[in-house]
Amino acid sequence: MDTATKHRFTVDDLYLMVDHGILPVEQRIELINGEIIDMSPINLPHASSVTKLDRFFNRHLSQDEYIIRVQNPILLSDHSLPEPDLVIAYYRDALLENEHPQPQDTVILIEVSDSSYRYDRNVKAPLYAREGIAVYWIVNLNEQQVEIYTHPGEDEYMQVQIYREAFEVFGATMTPDDIFPKK
C-alpha cells in the first residue's frame, strides 16, 4: 500500500463512540471534516473574552429572537460538528431542547483565538465559509482585534473587516472592553 487510507468519522460515529465510552464525555474534542480533533485547554484570557462576549450579547439581544450558545456544538454537516466559542442563532424552540444549530440558524459564529489562531483562520474559516456560515468572527487575543469575515464563498470569505476600536453590532456599540481582558 503506497498511501495510508484515513477513515472519516460522521457525527453519528462520534456520538456512538461517546455513548460506548470509547471517547470520554468530558474530553474536549470536535469533529472537523471527519477527523476528531483535540481542543486546546481554555486559558484565563480566552475564558474572560468568551464571558465578556456572552455578557454583551445577553444585554443587547432579545431572548425571544436569539439564542446565545457558548462552547456548544453546531451541526455543519455529517462530518463536521465543531464547538465554537459562541454562536448567536435565530430563536427556535428546538434549539433549546433537542437540536444543535445549523448554518441556516446562525447569525454570527465566533472563535476566540490565541494559540489556535492559525487553525481558526486556515482550517475553520474555509470550513465555515464552505458550509454557509454568513458571519464568522475571530477574536484575535494576540493582536487585540476582531476580524469579521462575511460573504462566504466556496472555501473562503470574500470580505474581511478588522476592528481594534469600537464598532456597531446589533445597533449597539461594542468596545474593546466588551471583548478583551484587561492587561
Image (cartoon, rainbow, N blue to C red):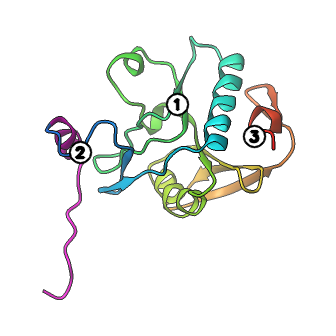
Q: Residues within 10 Å of mark 2 (few under 14, many from 20)?
A: some
- Determine the residue positioned at 67% across, 23% down: 55
Image quadrant where one finds the N terminus:
bottom left
Q: Nearer the viewer, residue 153 or 24?
A: 24
81 left or right of 65 in image: left
User: CA gap, disc 1 to disc 3?
Assistant: 16 Å
Q: Please determine whether, in this image, residue 118 is positioned above or below residue 182.
A: below
Residue 23: give its label.
2
Q: Residues within 10 Å of mark 1 (few under 14, many from 20)?
A: some
Residue 70: give its label.
1
Which residue has dot 3 on it? 180
Earlier along the polypeptide chain: callout 1 or callout 2? 2
98 left or right of 130 in image: left
Residue numbers of the magenta segment: 1-19
In what element is the residue under mark 2? loop
- Determine the residue positioned at 86% across, 38% down: 166
- Does the segment drawn in magenta span residue 79? no
Please state which amino acid type lies under the numbered disc 1.
Answer: Val
Confirm or deny contact between disc 1 and disc 3 (CB under 8 A).
no
Q: Please determine whether, in this image, residue 81 is positioned above or below residue 62.
A: below
Horizontal and vertical percent position of residue 164: 83, 48
Earlier along the polypeptide chain: callout 2 or callout 3? 2
Q: Nearer the viewer, residue 47 or 3?
A: 47
Q: Please determine whether, in this image, residue 55 is positioned above or below residue 122.
A: above
Horizontal and vertical percent position of residue 157: 60, 57
Which residue ends up furthest to the top in the rendered image? 64
Front position among marks 1 and 2: 2
Please state which amino acid type lies under the numbered disc 3.
Answer: Phe
In what element is the residue under mark 3? loop
